[in-house]
Image (cartoon, grey):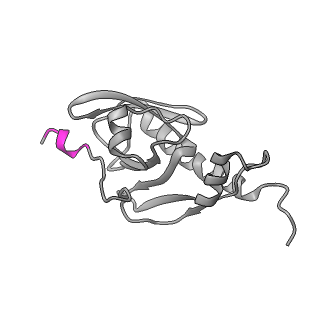
Amino acid sequence: MADDMIGYDQLMQDALRSVVRAALQEAASPRGLPGKHHFYITFRTHAPGVLIPEHLRARYPDEMTIVLEHQFWDLEVYADRFRVILKFSGQPHPITIPLSAITRFFDPSVKFGLQFEQHHADEARLASGDDAGHPAPREAQAEAVAPPAAADGAVVSLDAFRKK
């Protein structure tokens, strides 16, 4: 098998993350999320560039899922990350999530989901410095997925803060 000198896996991952970015840009527009659209976004809490309160990082050491539906503020979308203010335990906190930290994106209103899978062996190799300057190959799959939950079954939901 020939070596992939173009990096198709990374190109595909970047293209799929651009779908997430475009959906977030729609939510950040002045009219907000159209119709019944809302997003479940699961991300790696210790990924480079993730900025979340330390108590959340301690509570969710691997992954965390946030919901963007009714109660989120000041959503800003950049080329490589997004920033939003969410309430946790009744207190507003700004969080910043690089698109590369996202592992799952799901819009249950239309049953659309993306799942980004990384090879754990490649992540361990990168963390140990054994990458020899080459990025780890990554796979991304576009598929309809069930509503995400963290590995321990915990989902951070804002339902408790909604006015009924």
- Residue farthest to the left? 164
- Residue farthest to the bottom? 1
Could you tell me which residue is drawn at 30 percent across and 52 percent down?
155
Q: Position of residue 113 (x, y in %)?
A: 46, 59
Q: Can residue 128 be seen in this snapshot?
A: yes
Along the viewing direction, whichever of 34 and 47 lies nearer the viewer: 47
The C terminus: image quadrant: top left
Instruction: Decide: is 81 above or below 23.
Output: above
Q: Position of residue 147 (x, y in %)?
A: 36, 60
Number of numbered labels in the structure image? 0
Along the viewing direction, whichever of 33 and 85 lies nearer the viewer: 85
Residue 117 covered by magenta stretch:
no
Q: Position of residue 163 (x, y in %)?
A: 14, 38
Could you tell me which residue is drawn at 51 percent across and 59 percent down?
115
Instruction: Decide: is 43 above or below 78.
Output: below
- Residue stretch rendered in magenta on the structure: 158-163
Could you tell me which residue is drawn at 21 percent across and 35 percent down?
89
Could you tell me which residue is drawn at 58 percent across and 48 percent down?
17
Q: Can residue 119 be seen in this snapshot?
A: no
